[in-house]
Image (cartoon, rainbow, N blue to C red):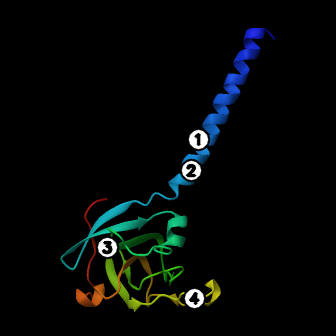
Amino acid sequence: MRTSEMKKHPKHVKMVFVLFISALVFLQLWKFYWPSLDLGLKNENLHVLHAKTLFQQYRGLGKRESLGRFDGMLFVFDVYAKHGIVMRDMMFPIDIVWLRDAKVVDIAPDVQTEPGTPEKYLRRYYPRIEANMVLELPAAWAQKHELKIGDELRILDP
């Protein structure tokens, strides 16, 4: 091997190493990116977080002190099922709204936090019928806006 070829090799190794580390950092940071959506429900416009990944769906609104600048969180599932919701690491109460094809099919109003409760003892909330979407809203939102079964959710931006 010529001396000039040997000198080039370490640069390639460094370049591959830098690209590899950059990709790892990107993948770790990507899971913290939360997309948002604008929705319409009961003549109200809502700016919500969109829990798209399994990590985001597992974490939900847990470990947040408030909704901040958002009005809620939307979960969209690929299958119709009785998707259970747990108040894991929640710091504020919420209303849970289950939807089937964007139509309200069940509501759990004013669901309270369960601080200090071990995971296996947390209460699980399920809809009465299968759904493919869940919308978490501030507690009392459903009552204040007279939300009822059959109301339709509109996605204002895809």
The residue at the point 67 percent across, 25 percent down is 12
7 over 137 or under it: above or below: above
Farthest left residue in view = 43
Q: Nearer the viewer, residue 119 or 154?
A: 119
Is tag 3's residue or tag 4's residue first in the polypeptide sequence? 3
Q: CA distance from mark 1 to mark 4?
A: 38 Å
The residue at the point 79 percent across, 8 percent down is 2
Q: Nearer the viewer, residue 108 or 100?
A: 108
Q: CA distance from mark 2 to mark 1?
A: 9 Å
Label 3–label 4 contact, CB within 8 A: no
The residue at the point 66 percent across, 32 percent down is 16
Instruction: Indicate the amino acid at tag 3.
Output: Asp
Mark number, residue 128 = none
Asked whether the viewer can see residue 146, the reply is no
Label 4–label 2 contact, CB within 8 A: no
Helix, strand or loop for disc 2: helix
Q: Quadrant of the N terminus?
A: top right
Residue ID for mark 1: 22
Mark number, residue 27 = 2
78 over 144 or under it: above or below: above
Residue ID for mark 3: 71
Q: Nearer the viewer, residue 32 or 41?
A: 32
Q: CA distance from mark 3 to mark 2?
A: 27 Å
Residue ID for mark 4: 122
Instruction: Indicate the amino acid at tag 1.
Output: Ser
Is tag 3's residue or tag 1's residue first in the polypeptide sequence? 1
Q: CA distance from mark 3 to mark 1?
A: 34 Å
Q: CA distance from mark 4 to mark 2?
A: 31 Å
Q: CA distance from mark 3 to mark 4?
A: 24 Å
Is tag 3's residue or tag 2's residue first in the polypeptide sequence? 2
